[in-house]
Structure formats: structure tokens, C-alpha cells
Amino acid sequence: MNVLPGEISFMKYRRVAREGMGEVSLDGRMLGVLLELDGSRTVAEVAARLSLSPGAARSVISRLLKLDLIEPVEEAVSVLDGDFFDYLRAQLSAAIGPLAEILIEDAAEDLGHSLTRFPGYGAAELVDLLSREIRREDKRNTFKRNMVEKIKEKGY
């Protein structure tokens, strides 16, 4: 079971001290990651410090979460707001028509997020994924240009 859908490299975790956990066995990589997770560093920063690939870091984080040794630092990630999604829907609808709403929901799910908690750092990836659905190059370019401006305006 994958407990980590979507992109985690920008997420931050911190160690958790729990009473009555009993004995836990950690390998060297897990211990190294656990010691680096202090709530201030992203997963990407920890992986770089320990020379871990993104896949290896993801695997270790997943195991540490299952052991209940770490927890996410929620305030570390801003989410896309309703204004952004309204603009996204309008721009995509202008480019491809009424299927825009469904494509946006599917794209968010493909990226491992919901529309209500879509992280701001994923805005460009979402726009890029959706732009691939626009067949006409002129409309695709207009969509991308308008969405890049919106991303800049919102500070995502």
C-alpha cells in the first residue's frame, strides 16, 4: 500500500515521540533520514544531504510514516485557492470546451491530490499536464501564457 500519493519532495516532516511504542528496528538509511527530519527541511533537502534518490527517500519516508515515527508539518505547504481554480476552468474551457472541469479533476487525481488540498508548488505541473489536452497549438500557447501569469500573480 502506498501511503504517499503524489509529489512529496517539497513536504516537510518532523519526528514524533510516542509512549509505549516498544522496540523498533531501523536500518542505517532510515535512521539517517529520521535524524534529518526536524520539520524545517523538505524531503528533497534531506535526500540531497544523504545522497538518496527520490525513490529511496520516498520509500524511507513511507516506512517511517507506517511506523508512526514521523508526521507531516502541515503549515509547510500552501494550497491553490478557489480563485486560481475558477481562472483555470475558464481558461481551459475557452481552449477545449465543456470537458475542462472533468479534465481538471482527473489531472489533480493523477498528480495524487484533491482540488481542495492541491499544493501550490504543483500549479505549474498541473497546468503543463492540462495543456497536453489542448490540440491546437495557438490555444495551448495562450492557455499556458495566461496560466503562467496567474501563477506568478498568486505567488505559487
Image (cartoon, helix red, strand yellow):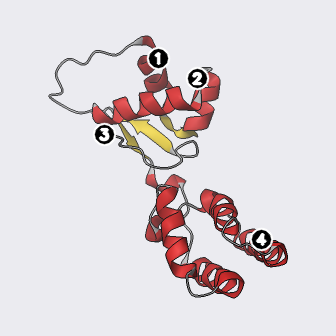
Q: Earlier in the sequence, mark 2 or mark 1?
A: 1
Quadrant including the C terminus: bottom right
Contact (CB < 8 A) between labels 2 and 1? yes
Return the residue at label 2: 52
For the point 55% across and 60% down, the residue is 119
Contact (CB < 8 A) between labels 3 and 2? no
Q: CA distance from mark 3 to mark 4?
A: 35 Å
Q: CA distance from mark 2 to mark 4?
A: 33 Å
- Mark whose residue sits in front, 2 or 4: 4
Query: For residue 86, what is the image quadrant?
Result: bottom right
State the SS at label 4: helix
Residue 1's disc is 3
State the SS at label 3: loop
Return the residue at label 4: 144
- Mark whose residue sits in front, 1 or 3: 3
Contact (CB < 8 A) between labels 1 and 3? no
Q: Amino acid at mark 3?
A: Met
Q: CA distance from mark 1 to mark 3?
A: 21 Å
| Position in image of residue 109 (x %, y %) | 46, 61
Q: On screen, 50 above or below 136?
A: above
Q: Earlier in the sequence, mark 3 or mark 4?
A: 3
Query: For residue 1, what is the image quadrant?
Result: top left
Return the residue at label 1: 29
Q: CA distance from mark 2 to mark 1?
A: 9 Å
| Position in image of residue 49 (x %, y %) | 63, 24
